[in-house]
Image: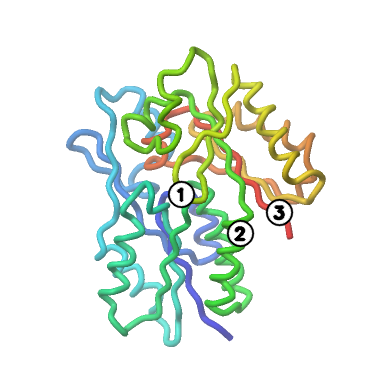
Amino acid sequence: MANVRIVTDSTSDIPEAVRKQYGIEMVPLKVHFGTETFYDAVTIQANEFYDKLKSASAMPTTSQPSPVDFLEAYKRAADEPDTSVVSIHLSSAVSGTYQSAVLAKSLLEDKGDVSVVDSKSASYGIGLLVVEAAKAAREGKSKEQILELVAKLRRETRIYFLVGTLEYLQKGGRIGKAAALFGSLLNIKPILTIDDDGEVASVDKVRGHKKAMGRIVEMLKEEFGDRELHMTVAHGQAEEAANEFAALLREQFNITQMTYAEVGPVVGAHTGPGVLAVFVVPAS
């Protein structure tokens, strides 16, 4: 039987209980408020972060793990003989995290079998790839089979998200192809995605939050119709909006699995409070 361990970083926004359940190794990014430094999902959690963000005098900054951080994680993950590692990370278009992981792999030289994957995604767009990879590893799938599964899921996953304001994406330099939207009219809600290049991009814009949610439903209907779907609704301190959105999605789609996630500190530093996202993949 194959022995494969899965490594990710904290921007995958996978709840700790799920990481423990599937033996997922997580390497945290850092959030900096002035001279204070916190480890994402380790020394600062989502709610604490958003509370701190609201009262902060300046925008927080974020930083990627060092290659040594990943190297240590790979050594922990592959502590048993004949163990391969699949390491899945934040889009290289928005962070140097993936490159840190690649460098860590090179430092192993020939002492470990590590495959580093650029998810070309963020938040639970990474998380769903990681969790499904970990499930496949538990089932005894080979590293090659797991890499094929991850590539397939990445192609099939659709991501749409709304932000309370574009200010955080713009100031953090992560606005990507949605830059033209900055400074748009009051109450215009851009519907954003992460495109095939792993960049933030705009797919549409409508007036008002409810209409934006309705438009996302329309786009998902056009693509998936009545197919069985797995969905994850994620939010940044916007639980009421997330519950409303999830109820709307349940009414409109054949959902065989609905999960919830919180957008964590590092991703939240770039999206701001009030972010609302849906991650959709066909059930089979």
- Image check: 240 left or right of 283? left
Q: Residues within 10 Å of mark 3 (few under 14, many from 20)?
A: some
Residue at the image position 41 percent from the left and 67 percent from the top: 116
Do the CB atoms of the residues marked 3 and 2 lie less than 8 Å apart? no
Residue type beneath disc 3: Pro
> Tag on residue 153?
2
Do the CB atoms of the residues marked 1 and 3 lie less than 8 Å apart? no
State which tag comes first along the sequence, 1 or 3: 1
- Identify the residue under disc 1: 198
Residue 228, above or below 251 = below
- Image check: 216 left or right of 20? right
- Image check: 64 left or right of 12? left
- The quarter of the rendered structure image containing the C terminus is bottom right
Nearer-the-camera pick, 124 or 213:
213
Q: Position of residue 189 (x, y in %)?
A: 54, 22
State how far apart marks 3 and 2 are (Cα). Answer: 9 Å
Residue at the image position 31 percent from the left and 53 percent from the top: 96
- Image check: 37 left or right of 139? left
Q: Position of residue 110 (x, y in %)?
A: 31, 84
State which tag comes first along the sequence, 1 or 2: 2
Q: Residues within 10 Å of mark 2 (few under 14, many from 20)?
A: many
Q: Secondary structure at mark 2?
A: helix
State how far apart marks 1 and 2 are (Cα). Answer: 14 Å
Q: Secondary structure at mark 1?
A: loop
Q: Secondary structure at mark 3?
A: strand
Residue 275, above or below 148 = above
> Tag on residue 145?
none
Q: Residues within 10 Å of mark 1 (few under 14, many from 20)?
A: some
Q: Position of residue 163 (x, y in %)?
A: 49, 28
Nearer-the-camera pick, 72 or 89:
89
- Identify the residue under disc 3: 282
Where residue 144 sits, quadrant-wise, is: bottom right
